[in-house]
Image (spheres, rainbow, N blue to C red):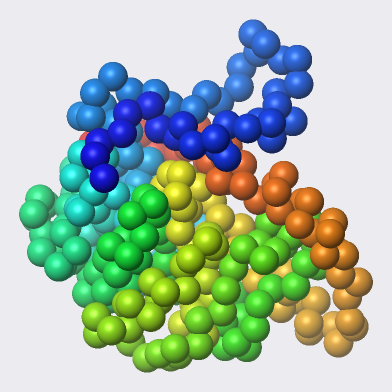
């Protein structure tokens, strides 16, 4: 894979679904997909959004000690990925303390160590799926709790429909610390054509073939959906599910990579105003 400027350009990211949110609104303020004149500019953009994703996770309370790792593939060297530094709180991640690592877990740029678990899971997925550009994982309260059930989310809401037939449950290595390379490959095998996984007794993982913004937003959304599912299950009442054909329709229109990216733009704008130090 060579460096690609003006991402994203894949047809599925700039299709008719974009027009649903831009009907005859020419000239009005609306987030625009990024374009770049050189690789350095693109890399800086990716690093800034990776940091913003970490800060967003902090705001959501997704921190748990040093657990949790987010990655984005380098645009010029696809065998390398940028990630948050080991044992640095999500709220303290900055552009200047990001690290760059290879698939073997060797840090090639940066002062901090790499999270071994993050390396095993993310490196395997990135290596096996060259189309995946970003991944997110954290040990969240509701995601980990729901993961213990070993089942998929049901289409109980429009939000949950975003993951209908677009997530999997991974039972392999359930509850075991994933530090073995073999465990990483088992996780990677599950990410064929889906954007999210519920790792039994472990937690949530999201991936994007579009951007770190999409991967981060869909992680936030997945955590919320797990919380909603747990709340509904606690009532003991069987919910009315969205019919499959309607769930698929909703997924295509509110669960796409582009929509994930678009949702994150509100988060980016808020962070840019309230936490400008993230760009240091």
Depth order, front residue of 94/249: 249
Residue 269: x and y in percent read: 50, 32
Left/right of residue 279 with respect to residue 239 in the rendered view = left
Residue 248: x and y in percent read: 76, 57
Count all numbered tags in the image, as a single digit. Answer: 0
**Vertical placement of 276 versus 182: above or below?**
above
Q: Residue at x 39, y 52 (%)?
A: 131
Residue 15: x and y in percent read: 63, 32
Depth order, front residue of 68/244: 244
Left/right of residue 35 with respect to residue 241 in the rendered view = left
Residue 243: x and y in percent read: 87, 65
Left/right of residue 47 with respect to residue 235 in the rendered view = left
Quadrant (top left/top right/bottom left/bottom right) for the C terminus: top left
Q: Residue at x 78, y 67 (%)?
A: 155
Left/right of residue 9 with respect to residue 165 in the rendered view = left
Quadrant (top left/top right/bottom left/bottom right) for the N terminus: top left
**Vertical placement of 186 versus 46: above or below?**
below
**Vertical placement of 2 versus 122: above or below?**
above
Does the image show residue 202? Answer: yes
Q: Residue at x 69, y 35 (%)?
A: 17
Does the image show residue 273? Answer: no
The answer to which image quadrant residue 132 occupies is bottom left
Q: Residue at x 8, y 54 (%)?
A: 108
């Amino acid at each position: 894979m060579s460096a690609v400027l003006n991402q994203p350009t894949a047809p599925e990211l700039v299709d008719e679904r974009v027009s649903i949110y831009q009907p005859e609104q020419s000239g009005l303020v609306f987030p625009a997909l990024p374009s770049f004149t050189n690789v350095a500019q693109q890399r800086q953009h990716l690093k800034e959004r990776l940091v913003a994703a970490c800060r967003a996770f902090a705001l959501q309370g997704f921190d748990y000690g040093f657990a949790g790792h987010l990655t984005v593939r380098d645009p010029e060297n696809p065998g390398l990925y940028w990630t948050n530094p080991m044992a640095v709180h999500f709220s303290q991640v900055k552009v200047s303390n990001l690290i760059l690592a290879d698939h073997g877990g060797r840090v090639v740029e940066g002062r901090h160590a790499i999270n071994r678990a993050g390396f095993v899971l993310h490196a395997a997925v990135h290596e096996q799926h060259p189309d995946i550009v970003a991944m997110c994982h954290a040990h969240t309260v509701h995601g980990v709790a729901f993961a213990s059930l070993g089942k998929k989310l049901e289409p109980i809401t429009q939000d949950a429909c975003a993951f209908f037939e677009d997530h999997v449950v991974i039972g392999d290595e359930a509850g075991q610390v994933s530090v073995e390379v073999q465990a990483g490959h088992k996780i990677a095998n599950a990410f064929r054509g889906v954007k999210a996984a519920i790792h039994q007794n472990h937690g949530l993982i999201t991936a994007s073939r579009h951007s770190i913004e999409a991967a981060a937003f869909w992680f936030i959304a997945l955590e919320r959906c797990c919380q909603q599912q747990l709340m509904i299950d606690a009532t003991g009442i069987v919910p009315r599910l969205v019919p499959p054909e309607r769930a698929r329709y909703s997924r295509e229109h509110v669960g796409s990579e582009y929509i994930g990216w678009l949702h994150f733009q509100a988060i980016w704008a808020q962070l840019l105003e309230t936490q400008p130090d993230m760009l240091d």
